[in-house]
Amino acid sequence: WSKTRSEQETRYSYDNRDQITSVLRLNADGPAQEERYRYTVNEQIAESRINGILSQHDYRNECVTQAGDSRYEYDACGRVIKRTEQKRGFRPQEWRYRWDDFDRLREVRTPDGEVWQYSYDAFGRRTAKRNIIRAAWKQNHHTVSEVRYQWLGMALSASEKRYADGSPALREQWHYRGGFELLAKEARAANDDTSDFYPILIGPDGAPQEMYSANGRKVWRRQRSLWGLAAANDASPDGRESCDAGFMGQWQDEESGLWYNLHRYMDSRTGQYLSQDPLKLGGGLNTQSYVHDPVGVCDPCGLLGCPTDFGSIPEEHHWRYERYLKGGGTLEPDTWYAKAQTAWQNNAAGNGFEQSVRNDLGLPVGAGSKPVSINGHVPDLPVNSQYGVTDIKNVTYLTSSPQLEAFSAYAKANDMPFNLIISPKTQSISGPLLDSVRATGGSVSVYDPSAKVLSPVDIGSQGAWSK
């Protein structure tokens, strides 16, 4: 649970996969608000009920096709190209999206006929958005038609809003505590020599909840659903101030109802991005989902959740040790880190049989003694012209695996032999595995630890081998 000043208490309930199933907000100045969620086996939202309003979600190939009143259509690259909102008693409303070859959103067409275009720099950061076709009702209104952005690294540092005639309307600067956590907004209106400073109160999910004037008066607040959908009373008391920030690294686009998240755009109706993760599977199995727990995890760059500190574990091995983060239940940070470090040291040192082979060959043993990695897998002997790509196995029945397939492919691509060293307990080696050894001109040897002897094994020219 969390508590914001004396006005609101929020309670969260979790399932066994550490996903939030219910949110209860107890307000001092209004009725309690409740949200309930059900998830698919792939940790995507299957159903939400916010203050009694049910929204069911349907998926095809991990992409959401229906979420409550909204339907989604995609192109061949898995990017949303149209959202249709059909509310009972109203005409359908359509938003259309155009993308470039780098999966960057370039244009949005809104139901009232507006067209907004977006520009980016070489680092993928949005530098401007422009309203090139205005809605009919805006023609005689002095409304913002362009916003320009400035960046400090990957964090937005300032934005300048301009009217249709190019004259400045408002400049906003954003101050941070560190990283992506907002501290305050500094705003200066056009033709004003002074700036107003607004401290920001951050909620447990990292998103702004309230904003205050320099004299302590509340000038803005936001009540959002778990996944960032704004409530009806999300407003400024006097209607003057606003805060475009959402979850860490997210910025609101009123014209589309989306949240700009540096490398992607997030839809709070679905808890999904409109395009796939630029990291592909490196960002997780659900390539279009936001984080699985928006209170405990953030994604400030639209790539993947905030990185875990893996210490001395090399990056290509992080996936091996992420199992210590979940498993039967999430471990405390110090506990999982200690287990992962121990596992890494043992993996780097090798088991007893492997160490015997390495000792007799005069090779170093211990943590860090196997520095070469191939697709995240570590061969047991040095990778060079002397040993080729060699792995040591102390198993009864030896068959192919993603690890051994990666080794054989690397050996073949680099004109090196792919070799295996087995123990006396090994009874058989599968045909496909031996075919990959033969294809590189490699060999199989058996090591007897009691006699300290390494002997060749006759694997023939085809088929499997058995004792």
Image (spheres, grey):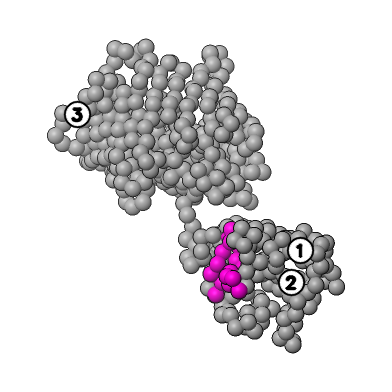
Q: In which quarter of the image is residue 155?
A: top left
Which residue in the structure is indicated by mark 3? Answer: 190
Which residue in the structure is indicated by mark 1? Answer: 434
State the image coordinates of residue 331 (x, y, percent, origin top left).
57, 61
Image side of residue 168 versus residue 51, left or right: left
Which residue in the structure is indicated by mark 2? Answer: 444
> Callout 1, which amino acid?
Leu
Kindly indicate whether the residue at mark 2 contacts the one at mark 1 (C-beta within 8 angstroms). Answer: yes
State the image coordinates of residue 375 (x, y, percent, origin top left).
59, 58
How many numbered dots are placed on residues in this image? Answer: 3
Look at the picture and state if 115 lies above or below 466. Answer: above
Mark found first going from the N terminus, 1 or 2: 1
Mark found first going from the N terminus, 3 or 1: 3
Image side of residue 340 versus residue 126, left or right: right
Cα distance between the residues tagged 3 and 2: 77 Å
Mark 3 Cα shell of 10 Å, populated few (<14), some (14-19), many (≥20): some
Q: Residue furthest left?
A: 193
